[in-house]
């Protein structure tokens, strides 16, 4: 089902908060899955995070930064740390103990990051989306459809994230 175009920041925040909830539900399923399914779920987590973070970096974080000096810096630092952790995990066998330990830590960090965004950024934002922001959101929604059908380009998180960010940025 296609997502209706978003007009307000509140709609965008609601959408991103729903995604946080979906990720909180999806993240524990990776380690609980059988070996074959674990790879598929791990890819879905990476794809979702790549598009989600790209959308936030192109819309939410800059808007929050305009309201409060350096509001976006801690979130960007958390995202950078997560990117490094994901890249490290990508080099491990998903069935190994090393992967499980690193994944547990990543899972905690992603949930903490989502809660920080909700309590320190999302609640400050309101109003209408600008025309460029609407275009960026629309581009991100197209990319989320590719996550849903498993066709988001890129083999690594970095490729997925960079591609998503470039596409979202170019739209607006």
Image (cartoon, rainbow, N blue to C red):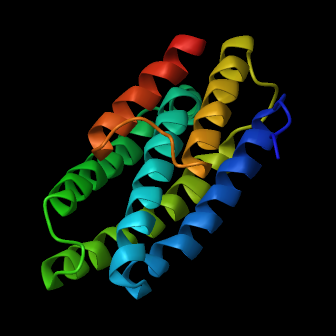
Most extreme residue toward the front is: 36
Which residue shows up at 20% across the image and 63% down it? 89
Q: Position of residue 65 (x, y in %)?
A: 50, 31
**Residue 55, horizontal then vertical, whole percent:** 54, 35
Please give the name of the residue rendered at 50% of the width and 51% of the height, measured from the top-left corner. 48
Which quadrant holds residue 131? top right
Q: Residue at point 55% right, 65% down? A: 23
| Residue 46 position (above or below residue 31) | above
Q: How many marks?
A: 0
User: Could you say where residue 30 lies in the image, as x and y percent from the top left?
Assistant: 41, 76
Quarter of the image for the C terminus: give it. top right
What residue is rendered at 17% in x and 71% in y?
Answer: 93
> Is residue 108 visible in this depiction of the protein?
no
Q: Position of residue 45 (x, y in %)?
A: 45, 60
**Does any portion of residue 27 appear in the rendered image?**
yes
> Residue 125's quadrant in the figure?
top right
Q: Is residue 57 left or right of residue 142?
A: left
Residue closer to the observer: 156 or 112: 156
Which of the 4 image quarters holds residue 128? top right
Up the image or down, 46 lies above or below 69; here it is below
């Amino acid at each position: 089902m296609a997502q209706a175009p978003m007009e307000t920041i509140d709609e965008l925040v609601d959408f991103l908060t729903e995604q946080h909830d979906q990720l909180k539900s999806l993240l524990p399923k990776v380690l609980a899955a059988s070996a074959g399914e674990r790879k598929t779920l791990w890819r879905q987590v990476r794809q979702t995070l790549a598009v989600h973070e790209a959308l936030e970096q192109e819309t939410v974080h800059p808007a929050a930064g305009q309201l409060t000096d350096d509001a976006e810096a801690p979130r960007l630092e958390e995202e950078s740390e997560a990117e490094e952790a994901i890249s490290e995990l990508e080099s491990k066998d998903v069935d190994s103990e090393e992967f499980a330990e690193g994944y547990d830590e990543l899972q905690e960090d992603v949930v903490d990051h989502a809660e920080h965004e909700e309590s320190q950024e999302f609640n400050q934002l309101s109003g209408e989306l600008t025309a460029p922001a609407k275009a960026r959101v629309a581009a991100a929604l197209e990319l989320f459809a590719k996550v849903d059908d498993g066709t988001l380009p890129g083999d690594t998180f970095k490729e997925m994230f960079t591609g998503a960010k470039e596409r979202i940025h170019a739209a607006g």
